[in-house]
Amino acid sequence: MDFENYYEISLVADFIIAHNFSRVALQFPDELLKDSRKVVSALRQELHRPLQNSDESRATAKLYVMADTTYGSCCVDEVGAAHVKADCIIHYGHSCLSPTTTIPAFCVFGKAPLKASNCAESLYNYGVKSGKPVLVLFGLEYAHGMPDIKEALNVEAMRFHDSNSGFQIHFANVTNSVITPSASMKLENRHLMLNGEQDNNEDSSQKTDTKFRLGGLGWSLPEGHRTEDYLLFWIGLDNSAFSNFILTFNSCEIVRYDAIEGCLKTDVSQQAKILKRRYYLVEKAKDANMVGILVGTLGVAGYLDMIHQMTELVTRAGKKAYTFLMGKPNPAKLANFPECDVFIYVSCAQTALLDSKEFLAPIITPFEALIAFNRGSQWTGAYSMEFQDVIASQPAEVEDETESRFSFFQGGYVEDFKLQEGKEEKDAVLSLVNVTEKALLLQNKETELLSRRDAKSGAEFFAARSYQGLEIHSSDSFPEPFLIGRTGKASGYEDEQIS
Amino acid sequence: MVKFTAEELRKIMDLKHNIRNMSVIAHVDHGKSTLTDSLVAAAGIIAQEVAGDVRMTDTRADEAERGITIKSTGISLYYEMSDEALKNYKGERQGNVYLINLIDSPGHVDFSSEVTAALRITDGALVVVDCVEGVCVQTETVLRQALGERIRPVLTVNKMDRCFLELQVDGEEAYQTFQRVIENANVIMATYEDPLLGDVQVYPEKGTVAFSAGLHGWAFTLTNFAKMYASKFGVDESKMMERLWGENFFDPATRRWTTKNTGSPTCKRGFVQFCYEPIKQIINTCMNDQKDKLWPMLQKLGVTMKSEERELMGKALMKRVMQTWLPASNALLEMMIFHLPSPSKAQRYRVENLYEGPLDDPYANAIRNCDPEGPLMLYVSKMIPASDKGRFFAFGRVFSGKVSTGLKVRIMGPNYVPGERKDLYVKNVQRTVIWMGKKQETVEDVPCGNTVAMVGLDQFITKNATLTNEKEVDAHPIRAMKFSVSPVVRVAVQCKVASDLPKLVEGLKRLAKSDPMVVCTIEESGEHIIAGAGELHLEICLKDLQEDFMGGAEISKSDPVVSFRETVLEKSCRVVMSKSPNKHNRLYMEARPMEDGLAEAIDDGRIGTRDDPKNRAKILSEEFGWDKDLAKKIWCFGPETTGPNMVVDMCKGVQYLNEIKDSVVAGFQWASREGALAEENMRGICFEIRDVVLHADAIHRGGGQVIPTARRVIYASQLTAKPRLLEPVYLVEIQAPEQALGGIYSVLNQKRGHVFEELQRPGTPLYNIKAYLPVIESFGFSSSLRAATSGQAFPQSVFDHWDMIPSDPLESGTQAAQHVAVIRKRKGLKEQITPLSDYEDKL
């Protein structure tokens, strides 16, 4: 495929010119970085191409290349762009199309090769066989191939002369490859999406069509239809975008057309396993005393609200919350905070699932945190990865404290004790008892008795550690004798023979 | 029949000297429930005529269907003694009316936890032994448990009717059998010498052994007969009782007592002459319908029959006659009242077993004195499902003070630590209830020394708890119960319809409450697991879950799963090293198996984090040959800080070592919970830290660098030390006649079991076989055994130990490797064990 077309140079140039941007940041993922120089020169050429009837170049925009994003490369790196005071970002490669906060962005998905006829044939055959209406979803890099597929599908239907056999098909569309940071629009979007997603109550009564949006795709279904009634046909790779869909619509039948191998994959049991595993993590999170909130994005709109909401949620559940900003989390970074029993990762939907045996503590998404820390909410199977949904959904009223919480790890009732404390103050006598109880409490010298699991805050955890910092032996006032240390590199000091 | 009302009952509850709390314990099928029913009959809850046919205490449909007891059930009985009967009673008493709180417990080993829960809240135990089968495994287990709790036992030799009707043995032979049964029981009891409890052995001549026929509703102690004969011989009762047991012979021809059999044909043992023969005679007369002979005999014995009863024939007649002559309730209840302690007496010595706190604080004193005016101390030992769906009664025993309707109580859960607020609730008791078989009666309050059921606490108590008054903030909880069985058999459950998950979660919660032993957990893969003591236990649990606790929502269950342990066979073949992610820190470690018995010592809590390091060093050096200094260098135990693995610091002169201790410990807890082979717990591995190289900058040797490294080096040392799998093994006891032995052996062979003891029961054609059987092979064992022996053999399995699977799990195709593959697949792990090279680094 030709280079200009792949990177949509002219389209990008038109976009820049139309909006009259002066400083433009080009964001590349690692795998496309090698093309950045060519893209810049091509783009510059296109921008500086003189207008037809004057000597002036079409635009004077300055171009900057950004690479190695702090968070997921699918998100628009607004902070990076702000460094060069860019007023627009062109995002290349795989994108999650998460809304931005301040800077408009234009996304170039790239164009992955797709055999339209083969795909259409598989789609048609499978669709007819299943007898369900089909909803076609696709990876954004395949968006360019949709018209071809539609056409090929018509051909296919013609071939079997049964174009009216009741085979229904709906195509999703790319909502918009331009991300505009407009608050009002975002709200509207969210509203639409939630209406569409409410499984059981069809309250989209006034509209004729229900509109859905997820991961940059939008589609509309006739009134009264739910996505669950459809066979979802995914064209693309088995990547995080696909996981997003499959977990959100976990009760749908989903097949995947692998464009590289050119065949259908119907086995999605791996995804079902992921969902069960997430359920386990939620249960585990319920037992946590200390929760770390990991900031996994500085761009996605509403991330600050989300962090606040999470902090509030955790505190209300009687647990201690700490916020961490550490770029892309890895096991070594997180293990520096062994006091946290669970981490909540606030990020865009497609980088949200971080699950590896290597992590000391589980990492959950804000949606899962909502289930875990909101008493009375239950894991019903409905799932959402985009945290904007979580913001929009009002936390369920905290259930009346008639029952203690049951932990599947301790096999019994456990109470999150801070939760209890606040309530009991009502009774004056009792609060007096409580105060006196705490006023004079023999501090146990044997700090070992305080085990890791019981610590309620970072300070308590620290107090339970056997090593608490520099130890000064007052009896020994002499300075340490001078010693010669090791020399050489850490990979093998000079006194160490490489065996 | 005694007129029986809740008010009457409540009144006697205040008479702490006139209360007896006792449990009925025995091997399965020795007739506990049937015997209990005849006692219940006497307290007036059910009519006398149906006693023996209706199992009053088996309240569940499946219990009735299977004919076994599954849940222990409490009943309060009321019994009035005559002055005559009490004239020899030496202890304290308040009038002649007695209250007996009786708990019938299951006999099947899978439900032993119910027995444990029952024993905790009682002071005495009626041990029921089948006179033919004798003392069996479960008799022994529960007896030991009872004595461990300082429960005084009395014995009844049950199913006497079998002697007379089935076996038709003569008197001397029967005596020998009974004597052996009693002796066997005494052998067990003799090992528990306890100065406070005194001699706990049982003696027929002292009236602590009864002879009963539960099915026919009659029983006697030697007291009954001694009373009858004492006046006749002109000696006092106690003298007479001694003559009725042991080496005392009477020759009616010479009317003389001797201590040896004189050899004359009329010379017979006292017991035979005066107890066994008369009963036999009566029974035979009844069975042969020789009514003309019967009535004069009965008249002589002072037994009068109602006219309609005189019309009965054969067995029914015999039953009626025996019930009238030697009513089971009288003999047994009198034995209990005479020989089992009242709460006030028992709590004096049980306080040490019960109370966790200092034995001189007000709470200990209140328990010791069974003080109704003292602070409330109540132990909830189990939760009983109420008819109100989803709700439970909290069932327990008041040890001091009073619990009343509406009282605000402090609930201390099993994880409560005095001074902290963990596992602690303050709630109202909505209602206090006393239990009477199938009926419950609400009462205003219940004073100490009694059992009680409470409404309104079930949402804060999972299985057991200690209750005290709201303001008693200094009270320590009552010691947790120790179970003799462990939940080794696990099954994964899931709902057929995904949206039923909340129902399943709710159901599991209720299941966890309803059974003292069952454990409901969740696996890493997100599957819900139910763990129980055995196949039968699980079967019952699953049935309860589906039918009672989930409202019939469909669930599917996996095949039973057994959890394994990972261990090592030898010391690591070399010192292994792992580098931290930044390559600046290095940990050198070796793994070695622990000395024999050390893992068990840690399990039992003899060695652990909490005990004094000096004491620990002493045990380790004396029993396990450790160097004394080394014993002080144990960093921690794991998993869960108490498990049977440890980390020992063996390095010398390493700088900053103390800094990384917490990180290494964290890594070790993690790694020992999920071993390298199949992410099963480790067991019996000692990890020795050989050397440590650390970066000079503290920031580069933080937890982030050291925790993952510690985990990797532990895996590397495990893999280099010949890792092995341990599988759980049952001790199986089977009782069967000789002709069934062949079948038993072949089934055991098939199932990888091996017999280590085979004994013939003296005086019977029965054999007692003890064998070890891997738990994983035990599924379907009972049924195949039944099939192979045409139902003559009945096994009792109880978890005994962990056994090493000798084959190498790292070598493909071996049995151990197959197990590992199965577990890894189930857990959704990669098929291959992560190779050593991923954990070990080279310089």
Image: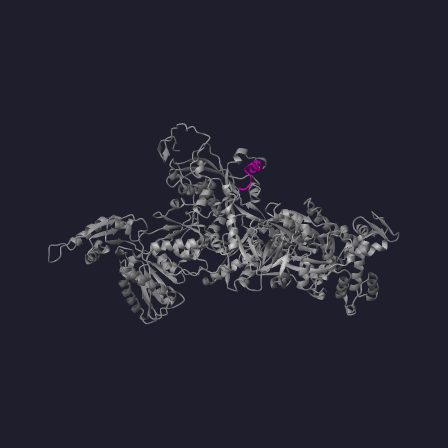
Magenta span: helix, strand or loop, mainly? helix
A364 left or right of B109? Answer: left
Q: Is any atom of residue A386 visible in this view? A: no
Displayed quadrant of residue B386 = bottom right
Residue A117 percent coordinates (x, y): 29, 62
Residue A490 percent coordinates (x, y): 36, 35
Residue B375 percent coordinates (x, y): 61, 52
B817 left or right of B700? Answer: right
Residue B800 percent coordinates (x, y): 59, 48
Furthest-right residue in this view: B254
Displayed quadrant of residue A390 = bottom left
* Residue B609 magenta-highlighted: yes
B304 left or right of B56? Answer: right
The C terminus of chain B lies in quadrant: top left
Instruction: Judge by depth and name the residue closer to the eye, B651 or B438.
Output: B438
Range shown magenta: B608-620
Instruction: Judge by depth and name the residue closer to the eye, B632 or B816.
Output: B632
The structure's colour scheme is one colour
The N terminus of chain B lies in quadrant: bottom right
Q: Is any atom of residue B190 visible in this view? A: yes
